[in-house]
Image (cartoon, rainbow, N blue to C red):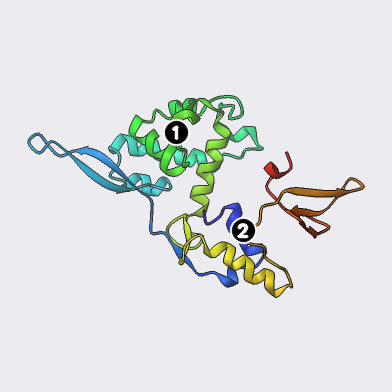
Amino acid sequence: MANGKLVKMLLHTKVTKYLEWKCVDASYVAQWQKGGLLKGAKMAVCKVPANDTEALKSSLMGLFEKKRCMNFYKYVENVEVEDSTTWKDIDINAQPMRDVYKKYKLEDNTIDFLGHAVALHTSDDYLDLPAKDTLEKMQLYTESIGRYGDSPFLYPIYGLGGLPEAFSRLCAIHGGTYMLNTKVDEILFESGKVSGIRAGEHTAKAPLVICDPSYIT
């Protein structure tokens, strides 16, 4: 995501100086649409509307549904997680996302692309979970659009493998060493403070260890 935490971290650490980026053109979904009395249904590939303006132009929805979707996008845009007065009579910390969709009377097809193409959920389980998480995901999607292009997605031109390569270049400039194909067997502590890591028979001393929480739980 163009406005996501990873991109912000890359900018903060200046790793972006060693990367080339490509803005993905857009998000699309395939949907069966009616083609008339004789033609029957046909598969159409349509751009995912990312805001209230695009919702009015989208071929994914009928006329009245476009209006309902536009109102929903305005709600998402104006919701502030820390300000309950913006929640419009919905407790986003307790009520499920299903209730939010119900309030705006959205159809199943609209709910489908909002949940999976905008909020990027991989299953429908989110419908019965508190709405807060999904609304934040949708806000990230809409905030990312226009930041570096017309799409919310950025991708390294030479693939995701370019990310560790860029970090290794920056690390080398500052005198760091990369240990490839090395398993961390233990995080070392001295007097209750981290002192480094152990990898097999070798140890690397450091006053700070940055890692995923799963390494220490």
Q: Residue at x 72, y 69 (%)?
A: 176
In what quadrant of the picture does the C terminus appear?
top right
Q: Residue at x 82, y 50 (%)?
A: 188
Q: Residue at x 56, y 28 (%)?
A: 130
Disc 2 target residue: 181
**Quadrant assignment, res 196:** bottom right
What's the mark number on residue 123? 1
| Count of numbered labels shown in the rendering | 2
Residue 173 rendering spot, x and y as whole percentages: 69, 75
- 127 lies above or below 71: above
Q: Amino acid at mark 2?
A: Asn
Q: Residue at x 56, y 55 (%)?
A: 3
Q: Secondary structure at mark 1?
A: loop
Q: Residue furthest right?
A: 191
Q: Residue furthest left?
A: 38
Residue 83 rendering spot, x and y as whole percentages: 65, 36
What's the mark number on residue 65? none
**Quadrant assignment, res 66:** top left
